[in-house]
Image (cartoon, rainbow, N blue to C red):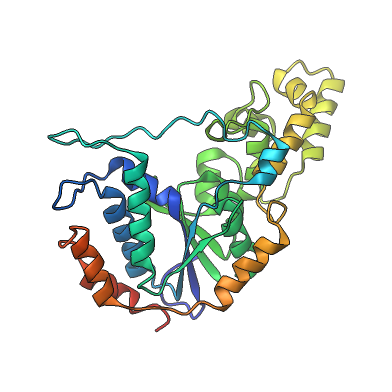
Amino acid sequence: MSVNNESDEDLVLIVDALNLFMRHFVAHPAVNINGEHVGGVVGFLYSVIDMVERFHPTSVIIVWEGGGSTRRRNIYSDYKMKRRPESLNRFYEDDIPDTVENRNRQITLIVDILKKVPALQMYISDCEADDVIAYLSMYRFKDNRKLIVSSDKDFYQLLDSKTIIYSPTWKKLVSSKDVINKFCISPDNFALAKSICGDASDNISGVKGVGFKTLAKRFPEMSSYMTISIDDIVSESKNHIADGSKIKAFQNIASSENIIRRNWKLIYLDTSCLAPVQIKKINNLIDTFSPNKNKLEVMKILIKEGLQTFNVDRMFMAFNRIGA
């Protein structure tokens, strides 16, 4: 999918907010005039501004985490347990404590500023931002061009002719071809691959001894745009065993069907982890959204927070194009 501004189609910019914020919170060294760390705020806002300037979206949706998925925790109680804290890689002359209070203060500041520009912010309780973004991409804006901003590989399964991803990690647009070239797995089969291989970042254990390279080697059809099912993989593994194969990957997959099916419920993005009331709230937020532009209020917030050097003119020049 092309995201240049020559297309007549609307482009919806969807930001995985906490994912983008944390990248800057742990790395960006900016401090305000009081010496307080504000790298999360500065980095986040300039990143969004950059996306708006480069791709000229007709709407911007910022999706915040909603406290985690109750349904996923009910499926697997250890889901996202034991996650390691983000390692900080900022450097200061003096030690500046990186507290939860500081992090939350920066997020609150971002939310307050974005209320003054034409960006719709979403916070849906008891679910993950992933599920909200998947619903927006697959259903609400199914026929629109979408650009998802996130370094989360779970979104690779959403890639199609209408959907592309900007990865802050890769610092580039990610297409279906990029995913196939890097992982030898197509976006159509990426959720299945993660269900088999597991996801250490979310504390999801996979099939022993089977990673992406092994999976792609033993099942080359995973790189095709043909959708492969759990039944296909398990059945093929059993057939290889029946033919006398001693390859461990086939044996381990055949004996781990229950784990793969459990992981699929955790990893596959659809509406299964959203309740009807949550979907109703998502649609209501979109239907009732009234864009706001209040440069003076943003300037007041920035002065109060000691961020006078932030380029507010650039911010409003970029957002003035939204809906134009």
Compared with 60, 7 (above or below) is below
In the orientation shown, which residue stands out farthest toward the bottom? Answer: 324
The residue shown at (50%, 46%) is 152
Q: Position of residue 237 (x, y in %)?
A: 79, 28
Residue sitting nearer the eye, 283 or 305: 305
Residue sitting nearer the eye, 38 or 322: 38
Q: Is residue 142 left or right of residue 54?
A: right
Residue sitting nearer the eye, 185 or 139: 139
Q: Position of residue 24 (x, y in %)?
A: 32, 47
Q: Position of residue 118 (x, y in %)?
A: 40, 75
In the orientation shown, which residue stands out farthest toward the right? Answer: 242
Rendered image quadrant of residue 249: top right
The residue shown at (36%, 64%) is 112
Rendered image quadrant of residue 44: bottom left
Q: Is residue 70 left or right of residue 21?
A: right
Q: Is residue 262 left or right of residue 303?
A: right
Quick check: can you spot residue 168? no
Q: How many marks?
A: 0
Q: State the quadrant of the C terminus.
A: bottom left
The residue shown at (87%, 22%) is 242
Compared with 138, 296 (above or below) is below
Q: Position of residue 226 (x, y in %)?
A: 71, 50
Compared with 11, 69 (above or below) is above
Quick check: can you spot residue 213? yes
